[in-house]
Image (cartoon, rainbow, N blue to C red):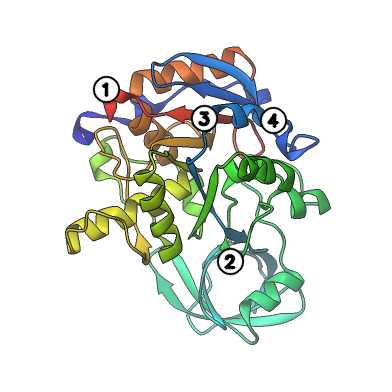
Amino acid sequence: MTGLLTLKDFDYVLPEELIAQQPTATRTGSRLLHVDASGQFHDLGFTELLDLLKPNDLLVFNNTRVIKARLFGQKESGGKVEVLVERITSSRCALAHIRSSRSPLQASRLRLADAFDVTVMGREHNLFKLEFDRPVLELLERYGSTPLPPYIEHTPDEQDIERYQTVYAKTPGAVAAPTAGLHFDDTLLGRLKAKGIEQAFVTLHVGAGTFAPVKVEKLDEHIMHAEWYEVPSETAEAITHAKRKGGRIIAVGTTSVRALESAAKAQAIAEGHQALTAHSGDTRLFITPGFKYQVVDALITNFHLPQSTLLMLVAAFIGLPRMKLAYQHAVEHRYRFFSYGDAMFLEKDLQNA
């Protein structure tokens, strides 16, 4: 079906004032648009998620941790540079985006944060290979800044350091937050557990490519960005256990979806497994309408940018017509959009399953 779809199928008009610039006063203070299996819309508060979930359901969270990936400095020539680390490849090496008037040359050095030097080792497609003089994570934590999305216009502050990070963030490596998880606090997680709703974790290190618009008119020509993920054995076992007990697998965020469905796809191709098992690696999975979900039964997600791969993933889950109506409803009812915005709880369109 991808070959029949074009970018204009995933466009919508969004008033600029609906782009959330700040988080809500409390993590759970956002709104929740419930799109049920029949396509009905219900305007709720996020804590009402408790009423939508049932004992034996399994919530799958992405426990990646956002790193302070943005650095500023200068080239040997004195020209200004902005570095955004995309992926840490070893203790002292990383792939990064670099913004400057002219691209730095191989073997040149950059002075960052007026505190340390990095060496440009070469290119890998649109990214630069950088070698640091000390462990990358240590330097980023001390000198870097939180890489807020391009549509958030303020300079990162102390509130962003806390709120652009999930309360369960564990494994450092993301340059963008898995934003559906930002709505959960420890109290809500405890209440969910007390109700018999299980919790499991995957890791997918979200890259800056998550914000990149699709630039080709025909979707089957789009080259998806790569992200590293891991589905651990305990999560695979929890999924099998939940399904046996009649529970639903509810992905918290599109990144959890990509991790779970990437593992299922890789294993089906390589080994013919019926049950999900532990898996890790890079994924370029591009989910568009027509995709058959193997693992995920319901999805908690924020509202996504027009013409984005994440919007296409949502359309694949609930159907393109229903997705368009849901976004129209959200705009008309003044929901807040994008990373610091409100959320949706999506039940799979049974005709689209």
| Front residue (pair 53, 23) | 53
Q: What is the number of the mark on residue 30? A: 4
- Along the horizontal axis of the image, is 88 left or right of 249? right
Q: Could you tell me how far apart the alpha carbons at marks 2 and 1 are, in whole angstroms? A: 37 Å
Q: Earlier in the sequence, mark 1 or mark 3?
A: 3
Q: Earlier in the sequence, mark 2 or mark 1?
A: 2
- Along the horizontal axis of the image, is 86 left or right of 272? right
Residue occupied by mark 2: 171
**Disc 3 secondary structure class:** strand
- Along the horizontal axis of the image, is 34 left or right of 48? left
**Disc 4 secondary structure class:** loop
The three-letter amino acid code for the residue at tag 1 is Gln
Q: Earlier in the sequence, mark 4 or mark 2?
A: 4
The three-letter amino acid code for the residue at tag 2 is Thr
Q: Could you tell me how far apart the alpha carbons at marks 1 and 3 are, in whole angstroms? A: 18 Å
Where residue 110 appears, as percent x and y from the top left, is 63, 77
Crowd rating for badge 2 (residues with CA inside 10 Å; few <14, some 14–19, many 20+): some
On the image, which quarter does residue 353 sit in? top left
On the image, which quarter does residue 189 sit in? top right
